[in-house]
Amino acid sequence: MSHLVVYSQEDINQETRTRKNETKVGENVQVLKKSDATLLERLNQCNAEYVLLGLPEDIGIRANGGRGGAYSAWKPALFSLLNVQSNCFGDGSNILVLGHINFDDLMLAADGINFKTDKGLSKARELVEQIDERVFEVVKAIIQSGKEAIIVGGGHNNAYPNIKAAATGLQLSGVIKTENINCINCDAHSDFRVMEGKSQRQWIPICL
């Protein structure tokens, strides 16, 4: 879990624009208390129903021939959420803002890759496997604690570790007995591509 950047109350306060006579969601959200306990233990001590997590990376997208930029989605999405006015439909008190996973080292390594070559794609896919490992461990703990994960940022390559973590977390918590879960993986594009690369080998495309 060394790559998980856990947010403090001060971090949330810096992103929340308070105004007199109104309450923002950011004033009600929860953060993890500082502790030497494991991530799972700390999550179990929190009564929030939802856990917000950022994945600021776009290596998988670029490795799949897509356009980069998804790494930048997390910060503005968090800012917008924290500064929504609290209301009767949602005041933010049932949300834990966990933080984000640090991919700076992998993003830096990706900057030196030529994604148009076979050698470059091979290196990129090795980085995607490292992304998978970091995402899996954090999301598994969230699901095992009985909470629902809301994940912002990254690309479709993150779907695999997220779903794998959900299945493992549910099994470890005793909610399910099998390692398999049903899911619908929605994509904005109706294209079919050659079955190549780690993330694409995980899926059987189905048209609904």
Image: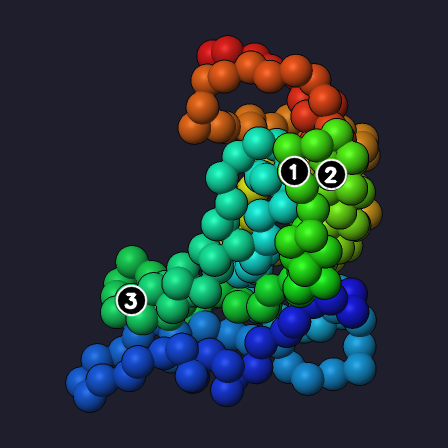
- What residue appears at the point 78 percent right and 35 percent down from the top-left corner? 119
Coloring basis for residues? rainbow
- Left or right side of 155 for 165: right
- Left or right side of 138 for 8: left
Residue that badge 1 annotates: 115
Q: How crowded is mark 3: few (under 14 residues within 10 Å), some or many (20 or more)?
A: some
Q: In this view, does 101 lie above or below 30?
A: above
Amino acid type at image mark 2: Gly
Give the CA separation, mark 2 to mark 1. Answer: 5 Å
- Left or right side of 9 for 79: left
Give the CA separation, mark 3 to mark 2. Answer: 42 Å
Q: Which of 165 and 74 is in front in this view?
A: 74
Question: Are the residues at dot 3 and dot 2 in contact (C-beta closer than 8 Å)?
Answer: no
Q: Which of 176 and 10 is in front in this view?
A: 10
Disc 3 vs disc 1: which is toward the camera? Answer: 1
Q: Residues within 10 Å of mark 2 (few under 14, many from 20)?
A: some
Disc 3 vs disc 2: which is toward the camera? Answer: 2
Question: Are the residues at dot 2 and dot 1 in contact (C-beta closer than 8 Å)?
Answer: yes
Residue that badge 3 annotates: 84
